Amino acid sequence: MTTHNEAQACDAIIIGGGPAGSCAGAILAEYGHRTLILEREKFPRFHIGESLIPFTFHPLERIGMIPKMRASAFVKKYSVTFVQPDGRRSQPFYFFTRYDRETVAQTWQVLRSEFDQMLLDNAREKGAEVREETTVKRLLMDGDRVVGVEATDKSGRTYEVRAPITLDCSGKEAFTSNRNGWRMNDPYLNKIAVWTYYKDSKRGVGIDEGDTTVAYVPDKGWFWHIPQHNGMTSVGVVAEGKYLTRGGVKDLKAIFHREVEENLWIKDRLSVGRSTGDYYILSEYSRHSRYGAAPGLVLVGDAFAFLDPVFSSGVMLALKSGHLVGETIHAGLLAGDLSPARFATYCASMRQGVENMRKLVYAFYDPAFSFREVIQRYPDAAGEITDCLSGDVNKDFSQLWRRFREFVPLPDDLPYGEPLDSAVSRGV
């Protein structure tokens, strides 16, 4: 296959047009930088991960998306609720107990095909060039520095394009980590999800219509229940694979409906309405990149790290990282410095957020842990728990984690995510 060389016509190449890539692309293009987004698929496209948490507000506001979100049909979300297998339901954790009800505390349940299309179109409106149905084949190297990519378009034409910085926003594909051997699985968080969509099933009313519900099943598995617009609801179960396939059951529909019987609240919610008939599976949830940046390269969103989705942190972390890295690259382009060290603060900030949310996830999966028991002993802990659930993850939660450790062990921070040059210089 012939490879065509293109003149260096851009300041930044972005691999992937999901939330991380679209956010970073919108910021860079708005600043006037020549920005190219290469997206493998044709939008709109299906994607899981529909529930936004409050701290998506700031990056969405930064890229001008809030008026578009308010004008959309997406269901408004104000809270998250936890339900025991016997149907006992906690009081909702309302975000407006901590944040302004009209801004941060009100978020949305989205259909990702529509939401991601809105984000990608927004990047286009800001001036980014978007090439869909274009697959990045490899990174172009000059010594140890990434200087661009080789890509193939839908016609089969392969070409090279170069830029001083390449952003890996490839999502769960984890383009760089998988090719460079940087992908590190989490020591414990390796779950499987099986999910489907229901039309016209039961949901809350008024302010609780858009409530995200986490409904437990045995062995610390759980259902998500996410009401969407047009009467649709996303419902899925997450647990260890050996639990979901117990008795040799492998059929996705059979797995799903067997688990529905394990939670009375979910069973009641799905007792009316109808399934769309399609069932999906996703495994190997939690993973991290050994490095967060390298010469000419920075990892963003799920390509940097992806956590178990129990607290719906994925889109928030993707948008947050896109926002931070967009501003960091803008400053670097102005200064003529895009060395890995330029991204040290970005990488440290993202790791802090990931580690704080990761501790919350680990506690959730421990059979000895209960939010209710923590709050009974420390009533003021409810506020910090709500903060973390809301995505306010870059703050000092050391007191909260000390309190959690009175009930369950929590993991140490993983030594991942630094810029490659910084880690190597320290012998890591």
Image: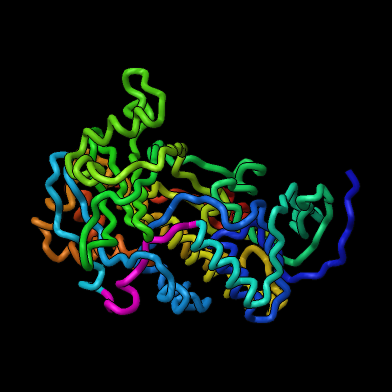
Counting labels gives 0
Residue 124 falls in which quadrant of the image?
A: bottom right
Query: What range of the chain is rendered magenta?
Result: 99-112
Residue occupying the point 14% across, 44% down: 87
Instruction: Tell me if 390 is positioned left or right of 420 in this view.
Output: left
Residue occupying the point 28% across, 49% down: 201
x and y percentages locating residue 157 in the rendered image = 84, 50
Q: Is residue 369 above or below residue 120?
A: above
Residue occupying the point 81% across, 47% down: 156
Residue 392 shows in this picture: no
Instruction: Tell me if 313 is positioned left or right of 101 in this view.
Output: right
Q: Nearer the viewer, residue 2 or 55?
A: 2
Is 106 a magenta residue?
A: yes
Q: Is residue 358 above or below residue 222?
A: below
Q: Name the residue at the top extreme.
A: 247
Q: Nearer the viewer, residue 403 or 279?
A: 279
Is 263 a magenta residue?
A: no
x and y percentages locating residue 143 in the rendered image = 80, 53
